[in-house]
Image (cartoon, grey):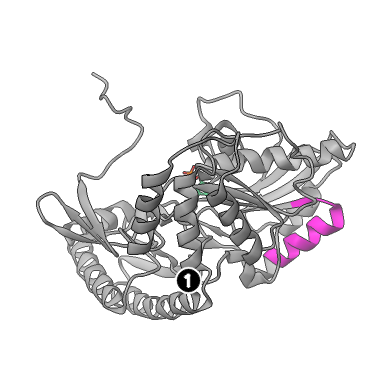
Amino acid sequence: MIPSVLPTYNRAPLEFVKGEGAWLTTADGRRFLDLGSGIAVNALGHAHPALVEALTSQAQNLWHVSNLYHIPQQQALADKLVEHTFADTVFFTNSGTEACELAVKMARKYFYDKGQPERVEIITFDGSFHGRSSAGIAAAGSEKMTKGFGPLLPGFVHLTFGDLDGLTDAITGTTAAIMIEPVQGEGGIRPVPDAELKALRQICDEHGLLLILDEVQCGVGRTGKLFAHEWAGITPDIMMVAKGIGGGFPLGAVLATEGAASGMTAGTHGSTYGGNPLGCAVGCAVMDHVADPDFLADVNRKAGLLRQKLEGLVGNHPEVFEEVRGAGLMLGLKCKAVNSDVVSAGYENELITVPAADNVIRLLPPLTLTDEDIAEAVSRLEKTAAQVTAA
Ligand SMILES: Cc1ncc(COP(=O)(O)O)c(C=O)c1O
């Protein structure tokens, strides 16, 4: 008999009842160190007092009105995002997938309005992940995500990750945009080198294409900059954001330049819940912390500390781990053992990590984790690795 919850997930046998900082507690009192943050979502950790206050005080006043009316919290969050990024304008969504949908529509509408309706194709890369909607799976293109769900949304060209030569050949008169994650998350924590992001920007400029960055996983302070592309000194035309921006409340956004967004006039797009008062009140509180240079400096300091200790871990367990990769607090341990075995062994040591493709385990801790949390995390990873070796 089919379970009452549609069985699309392979869930770990764990159930949490409370969270605080980087720690999660089960009903029977076991305390887990959370290096997953609900897949890069709880940027400020669990139950951060500023987020609890923002959500509960908003909840006492007004939950929802719809986008038929002005929403001051939405305006405030858009202003903060515009102030701190390349963007001139923001549309709020409920998720990263929904942000992907709009990014695709926005790029196509841009060219349609310019009198080039044939320019609909979006170039993407293998290993990418842009969500599970029809556009999202067509954009990523992998068999794992698309099999059985055809006919797929047309207009995506899939290239090999890092293949810049192939990219120039793939650009034709029907190309509209390049869409890429500056650091692939689900694909196994694969950062795009800064030089390559710069080259992509240049190629887009030369060919009049839009550069769409998917910062759903790598954005909002995760790599030690507010957004990951800042490391490369470039800016996109369109950017997808979600996960960390809501700190645990479902919230996403599409950020864009005035030019890229020029086709999105009244009536061309919408979302009932997107940008509602609750989500945006929380998003404002997240931004107030994460956009603070001192906060980001501390993320970088802790990232350096964690990475150094992880290099030691890999050196101590060469039969379990191959390398550390990633940026900031978006780190991956490429495994020699089976990554899911390492994740499961971690559970036995009350440690949460997240598997990814390419036999990687992801470490995406709350950006607020403490130095003591880092020491504890590495000690639990050492124990976990020793168990995997022994198995
Ligand atoms: C890079 C990237 N894009 C898009 C998505 C989809 O976001 P959501 O699950 O919020 O719809 C994800 C989710 O993991 C992601 O990592």
209 inside magenta stretch: yes
* Image point (57%, 31%), residue name: 134
Find residue 243 and report its horizontal and vertical position in percent: 46, 52
Residue lying furthest front: 61
> Does residue 128 lie above or below 145 as drawn?
below
Q: Secondary structure at mark 1?
A: loop
Find the magenta span and give its range. Answer: 197-210
> Does residue 7 lie above or below 360 as drawn?
above
Q: Nearer the viewer, residue 193 or 273?
A: 273
Find residue 100 and report its horizontal and vertical position in percent: 60, 42
- Answer left or right for 246 relative to 115: left
Asked if residue 359 can be seen in this view, the reply is no
Q: Disc 1 designates what residue?
A: 328
297 inside magenta stretch: no
For label 1, the crowd category at 10 Å Cα-Cα, with few meaning under 14, some 14 to 19 and many 20 or more, is: many
Give the position of the C terminus as an image quadrant: bottom left
